[in-house]
Image (spheres, rainbow, N blue to C red):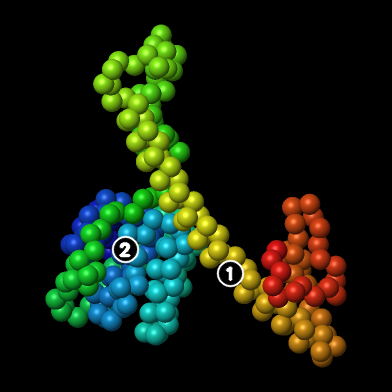
Amino acid sequence: MTASRTDLLQWLNELLQINYTKVEQCGSGGAYCQILDSIYGDLPMIRVKMNAKHEYEYVGNYKIMQNVFKAKKIDKPIPVEKLVKCKMQDNLEFLQWMKRFWDQNYGGQGYDAVARRKGVALEAPATVAPITTSRSTTNPGLAATAGRAGGRTPISGYRSGSAQPNEAIQALQAQLKEMSTHLEGLEKERDFYFEKLRDIEILVQQQVEALEADGKDDATLRDIQKILYSTEEGFEVPEGTTVDEEETF
């Protein structure tokens, strides 16, 4: 029988000594990696980001999983693009498969999940995009300050010794720090996907050049190049133009 969400979460939390409340939280990939580690005991857990907060970190965890699947000859596709979106149904189906695989392959040996994580304290992953858009929720001091904007008290009319201006500054500083952290994460994610596109560009170019050397052509490869080199205005690199290796698109 297929395990329910409640049963799966209970099993997962007991096995890994975590406190997940939703199946969607498995979408970060860390829990899936450690389930495999409980079976084989040889995953590079030091490289697994159990507290991953950004999609590029999720993808990194799944790369580790894919390497394990390949090394152990596990014939099961990993739908990474779906899982990283932290949707309930996709992660429920994959976690059900992981539970069946664990039941069939776990040898009953003891497993110290916390020790394998080097004692890293776990925060349950978010099931939505990590960027917070509500300032009133993140920084209540700002909300309180904003609420007084239309009042009768002038900006400079606060009582002597009031802590409100200091609280507002601290709230703004906290917001700035949070935004900087999110920006850094977005930049890393941008660079991660840019490198993927760059690898595709080079591979396609090599294939096109090899075909040209044999007097052949491939329409699909040409179409891929047009997509890679197109811009928002619809401009496309003319056929026969070689893109310099240092150029970006």
Q: Name the residue at the bottom extreme.
A: 214
Badge 1 element = helix
> Is residue 91 among the parts visible in the rendering?
no
Q: Residue at x 25, y 80 (%)?
A: 41
Residue 203, numbered label: none
Judge whether 235 appears above or below 156 on screen. below
Asked whether the viewer can see residue 44, the reply is yes
Q: Nearer the viewer, mark 1 or mark 2?
A: 1
Badge 1: few (under 14), some or many (20 or more) residues near its Cα, within 10 Å? few
Q: Residue at x 38, y 79 (%)?
A: 68
Residue furthest to the top in view is: 152
Q: Is residue 51 above or below residue 105?
A: above
For the C terminus, the quadrant is: bottom right
Q: Position of residue 46 (x, y in %)?
A: 30, 73
Q: Residues within 10 Å of mark 2 (few under 14, many from 20)?
A: many
Q: Position of residue 185 (x, y in %)?
A: 46, 56
According to the picture, the residue beneath numbered tag 1 turns out to be: 195
Which residue does the numbered mark 2 point to in the structure image? Answer: 50
Q: Residue at x 71, y 75 (%)?
A: 245
- Amino acid at circle 2: Met
